[in-house]
Amino acid sequence: MADPTTYRPKPGEIPTDPGVYRFRDAHGRVIYVGKAKSLRPRLSSYFQDITALHPRTATMVTTAASVEWTVVRTEVEALQLEYSWIKEFDPRFNVKYRDDKSYPFLAVTMGDEFPRAQVMRGAKRKGTRYFGPYGHAWAIRETLDLLLRVFPVRTCSSGVFKRAAASGRPCLLGYIDKCSAPCVGRVSPEEHRAIAEDFCDFMAGNTTRFAKRLETRMREAAAELDFEQAARLRDDLGAITKALEKQAVVLGDATDADVFALADDDLEAAVQVFHVRGGRIRGQRGWVVEKESEDIPTLVEHLLQQVYGDADRDAVPREVLVPELPADLEAVTEWLSSVRGSAVSVRVPQRGDKRTLMETVRRNAEQSLARHKVARAGDLTLRSKALQELQDYLGLDDAPLRIECYDVSHVQGTNVVASMVVFEDGLARKSEYRRFIVRGATAGEDGAEPVTVDDTAAMREVLTRRFRRYLEDAEGAGDLDLSTGVVGGDEGAAASSGDSGRNGSGNGSGNGPVNGSVRGSGAEAADVDGADDDERSTSGPIDPETGRPRRFAYPPSLVVVDGGLPQVNAAQAVLDELGIEEVALVGLAKRLEEVWLPREEHPVILPRTSEGLYLLQRLRDEAHRFAITFHRQRRSKAMTTSQLDGIPGLGASRQKALLRHFGSVKRLRAADETDIMAVPGFGRALASAVVSHLAQGSPQEPAVNLTTGEVLE
């Protein structure tokens, strides 16, 4: 790798004009092309502290061996030159917005003497008008078959056309009136071109005038008693109507727009675009690209540059709707207007039908990204590669077949919860997920309020509970008796966390950190992820008291914590205190996707294309989702808790009666038993319970079994 300081330009050598720059490697190959309004600050940003750069940028500047630039007059010229160089040099560090498949277009070769309508893929050609793209070629052929009744344009290949001209007999389409048969002179070249132009106008969205024209001719033929001609025109009108019905009407008839949407994660972005012409969706396409930065406006700018770089004027609509405005809106708008030959509006829809359509496109992008990630995660070869890469990069003795990831969720230290997700053989095993209520250290021995805990303290508490339970379960596990299905061992071994939660009983000492998971850890996980608790009882060491598997008897090969070096060191301290040496530990920091090892000054940087990094990110994101879902549930429940809840015999109806009588809880707290007994339905025992409950002050969060984390009713 090259040191960027060896080829850094001298101070003042870089101009402040707009321009385009190229980074080259040691072999002279262009590896990156970029543009800037002012070259000096942009190029200088590449030569700052390398640890502050985006990982992809850091890799680029260390791969490069030189940089050069070209000054241009305007930002629009810079945009055009940048695209030309990207196309010419194909730099490896530039994002290429290529379709994930070759989308078919309906093309009309207007550059030919006798224009031909056909299905086309691949690079676009000059003199050809394109409509689409379509999701499937059969959709184009079906539409074309309907419209050939009205617009009998040529569809045959050059060979068929020449043979028909030589023999003087048209092909089958010519005999059934789905081709005007210019090959045998039924129409002149000018008449056939007029048919092709009408066909193009119809496909471009000018549909109303053709439908009205056919209807007028049909009525005229009927008035003249030419019913055969009227019937043919009726069928032609029906064909046009059927073709239009296949295209959803989403906007006004005069609307021409391309609607773009993005769905992204830390590594990749899914792009979707709907092509709307004449208010109808004429085509749709999408692809997944690797992100080069976290800056969405820059992504949008490069996206528009790639999509419209080779487009002809008909391919650029009057409106381009984007999720966020491009980084250089003025230059992009001017460039698109020059390509189209008239004004183009680039904007973000704020309300109405266009905003609704943007949401639809965004959902398509999200689904596309999800399908891409599922396909990638389900690939056995890629999963094996990911585990092997983690073993190599982290220096593990074996591939980490079982990985556990932990995340903490809270709002300013309140309602602190944590999650544990498990991946086995590179796949999520939701039946092993666990959730924890984090209590923190108490302010005193008399059950005082828990103090606020930070992420580091919460992570330490959760890991202490998990691995102390592992030691207890492992100590109680013995050999399996195949005749009884019971594992021999300590009869007083701990019950499973799921059963402890359901029975409301603990199994460890009440001293020190809380030991165990939240009530019904398996059952509550099922509430979120749809895994039935009975399905969780199919493997693992069996508890002799309950006959169910021990929840924490298996240690992970690798523990991943969401955070940087402080969280990793706190987690390692827990493993050291408990004497656990066989479990590897790493932390994944979100900002630069750095992988931190315990007590290491510098992180491990995995390549952005690494399957191992992708697996760690999936773990981290799943742990975050699982934790934040539980946190929202608890926060929502806390916000809807009444001070009158929890009083035996006081249901919703009697609570309403009390509030109607006294007006507020404050006045109710000042009342005595006699006052409360004046409310219909309240006897002395219930009134006494209300007074006693309110005298204790505002209710706290539900009581929790400190051994199991169970929420006690």
Image (cartoon, rainbow, N blue to C red):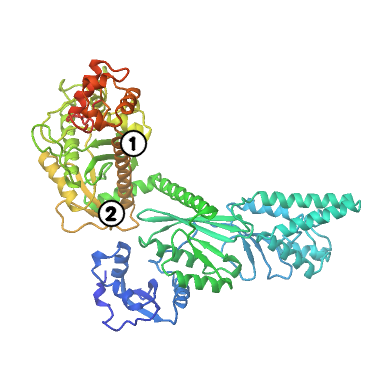
Disc 1 from disc 2: Cα separation: 23 Å
- Mark 2 surroundings within 10 Å by alpha-carbon count, few (fewer than 14), some (14 through 19), many (20 or more): some
Q: Nearer the viewer, residue 229 or 426?
A: 229
Circles 1 and 2, Cβ within 8 Å, touching? The answer is: no
Compared to residue 354, the image places residue 537 above or below, namely above
Q: Circle 2 is placed at which residue position?
A: 590
Q: Is any atom of residue 114 visible in this view?
A: yes
Q: Nearer the viewer, residue 25 or 570?
A: 570
Horizontal relation, residue 552 to residue 211: left or right: left
Compared to residue 628, the image places residue 295 above or below, namely below
Compared to residue 609, the image places residue 622 above or below, namely above
Picture coordinates of residue 370, whole percent (x, y): 43, 47
Q: Secondary structure at mark 2?
A: loop
Residue located at (67% from left, 49% from top): 245
Does label 1 or label 2 sit earlier along the sequence? 1
Horizontal relation, residue 596 to residue 143: left or right: left
Residue 458's quadrant in the figure?
top left
Which residue is situated farthest in the right direction here? 225
**Hey, what amino acid is under mark 1?**
Lys
**Hey, what amino acid is under mark 2?**
Lys
Q: Nearer the viewer, residue 492 or 434?
A: 434
Q: Secondary structure at mark 1?
A: helix
User: Residue 430 has which mark?
Assistant: 1
